[in-house]
Image (tube, rainbow, N blue to C red):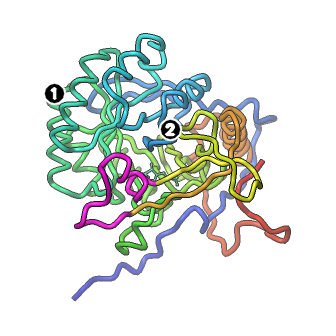
Amino acid sequence: MPRIETDIKLDFKDVLLRPKRSTLKSRSEVDLTRNYTFRNSKGSYTGIPIIAANMDTVGSFEMALALHRFTLFTAIHKHYSVDDWRGFAAKHPECIQTGIAVSTGTSDGDFEKLSAIVAAVPQLQYICVDVANGYSERFVQFVKDVRQKFPTHTIMAGNVVTGEMVEELILAGADIIKVGIGSGSVCTTRKKTGVGYPQLSAVMECADAAHGLGGHIISDGGCTCPGDVSKAFGAGADFVMLGGMLAGHQECGGEVVEKEDSSGMYKRFYGMSSDTAMKKHAGGVAEYRASEGKTVEVAYKGPVEATVRDVLGGVRSTCTYVGAAKLKELSRRTTFIRVTQQLNTVFGDDSWTF
Ligand code: 5GP
């Protein structure tokens, strides 16, 4: 008989952070920089641990340069050539060393390309092994192979949503586990498959599992506004990965296009398993699979800098509300309260604009 877990699992929208008495005077006193040493690579990290997703449009070299100015991180999408990497590395050695991961899938071709990029760009320190479903044995084996070939690179791997798989991947050699299935803004996995896990609970459970072993996690997907980023950190995420919140900017891949009804400019944003991505990179959707991503038009927002400032300002402010002088203290100072309503929507649109 199928089992049912009756514990309610929660999403960002189900909770708010409870304010706490604090001695902090201003959000300008809050330090968002984190320092980590990784379990398997022994590498170290310093920066504000927010990561642009390794999606075609968001994980671009241009995005990496813009985010690196704020010490944010970018997982570069996997469709740049070895020559593109070489060219970027020659011009921006510092960004390569501290602000970028190279992404890879798990095919033999992916492994070869990864090896070629790492050989061409020896300063590179981070590898992001990314599959939609991190529960396959083949994926675990791939992580082991990458660890064996690159003993001192810091390996991000995912995606999974449960503690036992986080542990398995860390023991297989990964340092940072990407957590999130079905929560992404252009993800249709839950509709197509019925599979998923509410993001806040996934992060809380996976952070607990990872930290028990000295590993780290990324909360990947589902952030719709700066408050969600704070909730992810509050839940124990070491890093937070953003796709949709960084879409539509100047630094994103793709053209700025005028809307058909001339109501403004937009950029296209699409899931990495969408029809759009599969047509672009794989010559179409294979017969045996369904597309699990959508394509949307995001209003053009100009340079990403303003968005970054808004997100960082929001997280700093969260820290002052709960009395955390440093981002490091946020999860310790977090009490979530379950709620039935997040926002007052009397004036309509409740999407994130600033
Ligand atoms: P967002 O920040 O937009 O809510 O979520 C970004 C994350 O969505 C990505 O980092 C990735 O894990 C996930 N994602 C990206 N493209 C797709 C897709 O086509 N299908 C699914 N299921 N997830 C996707």
Q: Position of residue 226 (x, y in %)?
A: 66, 48
Amino acid type for the residue under numbered disc 1: Lys
Work out whether residue 89 or residue 324 is closer to the camera in this orientation and state it.
89
Give the number of the disc on residue 149.
Answer: 1
Image-based side of 150 in relation to 319, left or right:
left
Q: Quadrant of ligand 1?
A: bottom left
Name the residue tied to disc 2: 51
Image-based side of 279 in relation to 199, left or right:
left
Give the number of the disc on residue 243.
Answer: none
- Above-or-below relation of 98 to 230: above
Q: Residue at coordinates 43% horizontally, 27% vertically from top-left? A: 100
Label 2, secondary structure: give it: strand
Q: Is residue 346 magenta?
A: no
How many numbered circles does the render carry? 2
Which residues make up the magenta segment? 271-291
Q: Position of residue 94 (x, y in %)?
A: 47, 14
Q: Is residue 195 visible?
A: yes
Amino acid type for the residue under numbered disc 2: Ile
